[in-house]
Image (cartoon, helix red, strand yellow):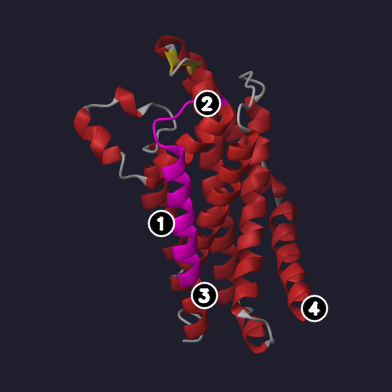
Amino acid sequence: MNNSIALKTIVKKEIYRFVRIWPQTLLPPAITTALYFLIFGKLIGNRIGTIGGASYMDYIVPGIILMSIISHSYSNVVSSFYSTKFQRNIEELLVAPVPNWVILSGYVSGGICRGLLVGIVVALISMLFADIVVLHPAIMVSVAVLTATLFSLAGFINAVLAESFDDISIIPNFVLTPLSYLGGVFYSVDMLSDVWQKIIMGNPILYMINAFRYGMIGVTDVDIRLAFMMIAGFIVLLTGFSLVMLHKGTGIKN
């Protein structure tokens, strides 16, 4: 009973944190999405034509939605948990009879909520530019939730290991952003040369975006089963690593 109360408290705090400053957390993705569709969809899309039987505008919508989910689920957890460390509020959790899995679940749930809420906002904006009928809603929702979970965990690990505010911006700027743009958001793998096709297939975000795209418009460059296995495998790996770090007090107790 105490664990459920602690979990609800952390989740409520995390949700209130980003909802309270919605002009900074929810409004910018809407503006950025509109610019993406205007520049890439309207201006460039007319010259490209169709990809996999779908118009270019319809093709880029799933990738832009999932890219927003990735970045905001990650940034919510990394900024929130590191701020807790920096302000020494983490000590209250450490001395409280709260299991590590509750702490992890609370912060990750907050990241999932923000990622999915931003995804919904971006999806609503996309409806102004594209007329998409979701073909496989169960796959689309599953990929969105699993991807938000994965990158919330990644954000938690980054926050635990970070020693300064500069450390929490390195991964998003130099890892997540390049991998997202190279993950097939704006193009199909078939449009690349053989060498780049082999290189790009090593990008795990490519599989997530294509699985999400398949759920929305039925177009994919990868095996959907492999994509789900990869996402689930990373979630298990990062969950275990996060719990081990909390148990040892890595980056928290020292």
Q: Residue 1 carries which label?
A: 4
Whole-angstrom CA distance, mark 2 to mark 4, is 43 Å
The amino acid pointed to by label 1 is Ile
Tell me if mark 1 has few (under 14), some (14-19) or many (20+) residues whose alpha carbon lies within 10 angstroms of its own. Answer: some
Q: Does the magenta stretch include residue 225?
A: yes
Which of the two labelled residues, at mark 2 and mark 4, occupies the earlier sequence position?
4
Q: Is residue 120 magenta?
A: no
Whole-angstrom CA distance, mark 1 to mark 4, is 37 Å
> What is the span of residues highlighted in magenta in the rendered image?
217-240
Whole-angstrom CA distance, mark 1 to mark 3, is 21 Å
Which of the two labelled residues, at mark 1 and mark 3, occupies the earlier sequence position?
1
Q: Residue 171 carries which label?
A: 1
The amino acid pointed to by label 3 is Leu
Query: Which percent across, then down, holds residue 67?
Result: 51, 40
Q: Mark 3 points at which residue?
A: 243
Whole-angstrom CA distance, mark 2 to mark 1, is 31 Å
Tell me whether circle 3 and circle 2 mark residues in contact (CB < 8 Å): no
Tell me whether circle 2 and circle 4 mark residues in contact (CB < 8 Å): no
Of the 4 image quadrants, the one containing the N terminus is bottom right
Which residue is at a point 49% across and 59% down the rendered structure image? 235
The amino acid pointed to by label 4 is Met
Query: Which percent across, then down, holds residue 210?
Result: 46, 35
